[in-house]
Image (cartoon, rainbow, N blue to C red):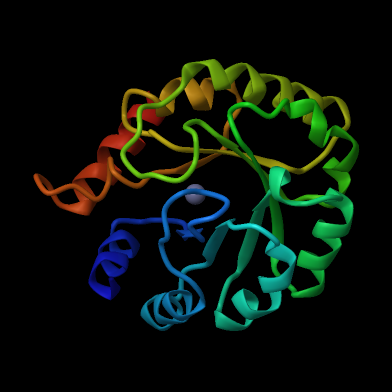
């Protein structure tokens, strides 16, 4: 894992996005605090920890201690977003909220002032390598409009199925953070090639 992170860092990644899955909020189990700590030892880059877990508030402190720089949790996993965001802030990490494809973006509007970033899931969470869902892009567009209207600094990310074909429409819709997994970590080409293809697609 250290080697793979080093390749992304050398290729100019802005941070490392870590998908934490608990086998409960999503069917798969990925990894937890120990792997975040190992990632922390492997890179100076910010670690963007995406918690796909139930009761995320119980684990914020331990992920922060393990080395998270930014923590995002799912709107669907918390009772009160403002309480959750305050709890993330208390750890010293930047705070983000993630919404699943079926969750309306309007649910976030009253809490935009409490957030640093929103991740719009562009697949249903829980598995790598899924196909991008273009029907999620109107949410990105609506959120970009809303953020502009209220003069907020919140960033908008897209997470899931992002590659050189799907990144451009996501950016055109208003995304300014791109999370990529399978399109960068491939068997048939080095990490740097995947990142270069993504960057070139977005700049065009
Ligand atoms: Zn993620």
Asked whether, in this view, residue 114 is left or right of residue 31, the answer is right
In the depicted structure, whether residue 129 falls above or below residue 29: above
Asked whether, in this view, residue 120 is left or right of residue 83, the answer is left
In this rendering, the count of numbered labels is: 0
Instruction: Give percent across and percent down for residue 96.
Output: 69, 52
Work out whether residue 197 or residue 136 is closer to the camera in this orientation and state it.
136
Residue found farthest to the left: 188
Instruction: Give percent across and percent down for residue 49.
Output: 55, 62
* Residue drawn at x 66%, y 72% as measured from the top left: 59
Residue 112, quarter of the rendered image: top right
Dividing the image into 4 quarters, which one contains the N terminus?
bottom left
In the depicted structure, whether residue 114 falls above or below residue 122: below
* Residue drawn at x 47%, y 74% as measured from the top left: 36
Asked whether, in this view, residue 106 is left or right of residue 55, the answer is right
In the depicted structure, whether residue 44 falls above or below residue 5: below
* Residue drawn at x 9%, y 44% as measured from the top left: 188
* Residue drawn at x 59%, y 58% as measured from the top left: 53
Instruction: Give percent across and percent down for residue 95.
Output: 72, 58
Residue 173, quarter of the rendered image: top right
Residue 10, quarter of the rendered image: bottom left
Instruction: Give percent across and percent down for residue 204.
Output: 37, 23
């Amino acid at each position: 894992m250290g080697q793979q992170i080093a390749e992304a860092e050398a290729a100019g990644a802005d941070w490392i996005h870590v998908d934490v899955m608990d086998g409960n909020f999503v069917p798969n189990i990925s990894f937890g605090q120990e792997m975040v700590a190992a990632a922390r030892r492997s890179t100076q880059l910010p670690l963007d920890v995406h918690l796909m877990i139930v009761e995320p508030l119980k684990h914020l402190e331990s992920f922060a201690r393990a080395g998270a720089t930014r923590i995002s949790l799912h709107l669907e996993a918390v009772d009160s977003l403002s309480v959750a965001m305050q709890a993330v802030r208390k750890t010293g990490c930047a705070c983000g909220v993630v919404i699943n494809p079926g969750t309306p973006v309007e649910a976030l509007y009253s809490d935009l002032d409490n957030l640093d970033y929103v991740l719009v899931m562009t697949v249903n969470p829980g598995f790598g390598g899924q196909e991008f869902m273009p029907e999620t892009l109107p949410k990105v567009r609506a959120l970009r409009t809303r953020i502009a209207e209220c003069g907020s600094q919140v960033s908008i990310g897209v997470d899931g199925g992002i590659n050189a074909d799907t990144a451009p429409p996501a950016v055109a819709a208003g995304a300014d953070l791109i999370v990529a997994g399978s399109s960068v970590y491939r068997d048939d080409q080095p990490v740097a090639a995947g990142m270069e293809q993504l960057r070139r697609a977005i700049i065009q």
